Amino acid sequence: MKTVAILESLDTKLEESLFAAEMINKQGLNTLLIDNSTWNLDVGKGDIQPLEVLSYASLDRDSFLKLNKPEKIAAMTSGLVELISKLYKEGKIDGIMSVGGGQNGAMAAPVMKALPFGFPKVLSSALACGSREMEQFVGEKDIFVVPTVADIAGLNPITKTLIRSVCAATAGLVKYGEVYHQTGGHKIIAATMLGETTKGTMEALRLITEGTDYETVVFHANGVGGRCMESLIEEGQINAVLDYTLHEIVCELFGGYCSGAKNRLLKSLEYGLPTLVVPGGLDMNDYYNEETGTFLPADFRERKSILHNQNIWHSKVVPSEAVKLVDTVCERLATAKKPVTLVVPTKGGCQTTSPGGPIADPAIDEMMVERFRERVSPNTKLVIVDAAVNDPEFAKVVADEFKILLKAYGWE
């Protein structure tokens, strides 16, 4: 039978954890109850005890007891990550779940984030609700998150219903979920896109894949999408990258609504994948417009801006930002050890910054193009196209250059 790892603090959630294990067993699955208690290390009811978990963090009882509470949580989490990663690699677990409060969720989330895409992961926490960001629970992984509604403090009709539901969801994923692997030698091309670059991205992908068996996966460049793509690159799920939208770099350097991604561009170069880059969205930032205007830059009124929706402003970058953005992209591309191509439009990197767009600024566009000419390294093939990022003629050049790049990497 398949096995579900259950991460629980048995010193505070013993009755509830045993109930969860019983519910999983009733679904016809084995359980591996892992005790990540930090207060009482000797509950003795788990299949794996806290001291065994701590051994994976190179800690014994005496060393652990000298730590303060945050340090204990960090140490237990570190041990859990190593332990669960080992169990996964050895094929000893087929899914993972956790039900608890804030502390248990804080320990379970990094463990689940360390597991690959497609592996069943269900996290239920009392803090997975309200105005809290989901970053702490999800990151760039496919983790199913469920608020507990009531605190997990005893068994009652509410908590039993919740735990039963979480267990049923976990069991369903383990028994019926499926990871679709590449078959028949098909190759997967990843692309980045925003609404502002959709037309160009989709047209380029259409031209690239026409008459081939290539598959494409598109990632929304919103601060998380680029990270998700790069996480899948690390897992070996991606074969080539059309990085059509670099907007996350703008927010990485200057802040903005799509913040969250760090060191974009580097992962595909590190892994030596065929990579073609377009500076889509590199000439625009976006700001969240709360009633107080807190998130708007001090010089916002001097910038060319347009309201994207009721909460978000799009703003054309200013000259100092444009220079830093181009330099950053060129510096990162210079790390490539294999051929890489950069295709740059002369007439705007977004729909709203293109000719006739509400925040078009040809002077900034010209500055960025010339800066690319000056700063691009010899290992990067630079192609300048006299068009806007979403123009069909620009997408065709991108597709043609991508095909040339793939051929250089030995793709048929």
Image: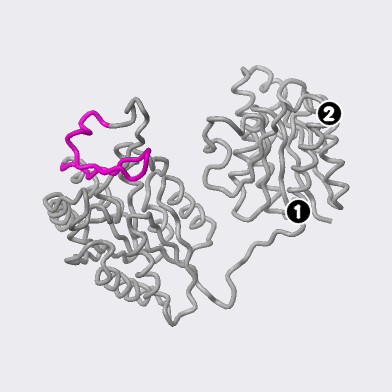
Vertically, is 52 above or below 72? below
Look at 62% across and 17% down and name the residue there. Answer: 68
Q: In the rendered image, which quarter contains the C terminus?
A: bottom left
Quadrant housing residue 396: bottom left
Measure the alpha-carbon separation of dots 2 and 1: 24 Å
User: Farthest residue toward the front?
Assistant: 310
Q: Position of residue 96 (x, y in %)?
A: 71, 45
Dot label at residue 156: 2
In the image, residue 326 lies in the stretch drawn in magenta? no
Quadrant housing residue 76: top right
Q: Amino acid at mark 2?
A: Asn
Front residue of this view, candidates 325 and 85 = 325
Vertically, is 47 above or below 94? above
Q: Position of residue 302 (x, y in %)?
A: 17, 35
Front residue of this view, candidates 63 and 271 = 271
In the image, residue 311 lies in the stretch drawn in magenta? yes
Look at 60% across and 52% down and name the residue there. Answer: 116
Look at 33% across and 55% down and name the residue there. Answer: 196
Side of 115 relative to 272 (left or right) = right
- Mark 2 nearby-residue class (10 Å; few <14, some 14–19, many ≥20): few
Q: Which residues are magenta?
A: 297-319
Q: Position of residue 97 (x, y in %)?
A: 72, 42
Quadrant housing residue 73: top right
Q: In the rendered image, which quarter contains the N terminus?
A: bottom right
Look at 42% across and 79% down and name the residue there. Answer: 210
Q: Secondary structure at mark 2?
A: loop
First along the sequence among labels 2 and 1: 2
Q: Amino acid at mark 1?
A: Gly
Q: Which residue is mark 1?
A: 172
Vertically, is 151 above or below 229? above
